[in-house]
Amino acid sequence: DAMVIQNPRYQVTQFGKPVTLSCSQTLNHNVMYWYQQKSSQAPKLLFHYYDKDFNNEADTPDNFQSRRPNTSFCFLDIRSPGLGDAAMYLCATSSSGRLYEQYFGPGTRLTVT
Amino acid sequence: AQRVTQPEKLLSVFKGAPVELKCNYSYSGSPELFWYVQYSRQRLQLLLRHISRESIKGFTADLNKGETSFHLKKPFAQEEDSAMYYCALTGDSSYKLIFGSGTRLLVRP
């Protein structure tokens, strides 16, 4: 089945230790997104790639970076995680013809100790 | 400011009862409104969009621009409707979904 895959599903990192979350997709969608979702809150868009063009949200902390080496893969790098970065991180994709219909991965739950 | 408000964190109803999940929005232009749903152990997925004006799994939602609302309704709730429901909007930047904080619907037998 075509889908959005996120690895790992659970990630524990130490305060200040860089961590990378990965997302892959078999939908061949040209747009990929990263959201942060804290407990009982709305998913919040961090950034997205439209093809190779990177688009950062204005309020996304500099601590968060992303890479998209090819159509299928996208990475979220957190350079120096703080306790406040503990959250569920959701990857999503969409095609340019139907941007509003985003296909989500299962998420990676990040714990910062 | 662009905002989506879902005032209820939890809505509990009995099977067969009508259900209405509330959503209010704040947006200066002409937004497009959506409902996304997340069933237990499944991914977040699109349920319906206001432009389609369709009924999905018995759910409908009408955009009321005067009241800036987009409530989700179903006349007879089923146990399989139990899930987390998120209202969302897009505006000028059609890629950007702005989500509400979600309402958990629990349909009891």
Image (tube, coloured by chain):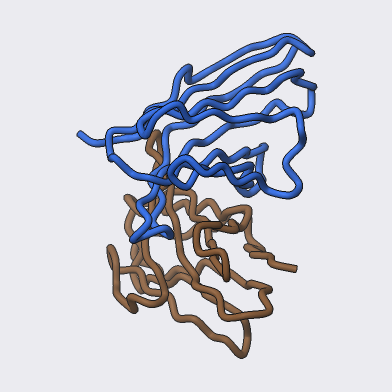
Residue B57 locus on image (x, y percent): 28, 63
B4 lies above or below A110 = below
User: Would residue B108 be seen by someone viewing this image from the given angle?
Assistant: no
* Image chain in blue: A
Residue appearing at x 63%, y 53% in the figure:
B101
Q: Nearer the viewer, residue B25 or A97?
A: A97
Residue A22 locus on image (x, y percent): 48, 23
Q: Quadrant of the C terminus of chain A?
A: top right
Residue A78 locus on image (x, y percent): 68, 23
Quadrant assignment, res B4 = bottom right
Quadrant assignment, res B60 = bottom left
Residue appearing at x 52%, y 75% in the figure:
B70
Residue B41 locus on image (x, y percent): 40, 33
Quadrant assignment, res A6 = top left
Q: Nearer the viewer, residue A9 or A103?
A: A103
Q: Nearer the viewer, residue B70 or A93?
A: A93
B16 lies above or below A2 = below
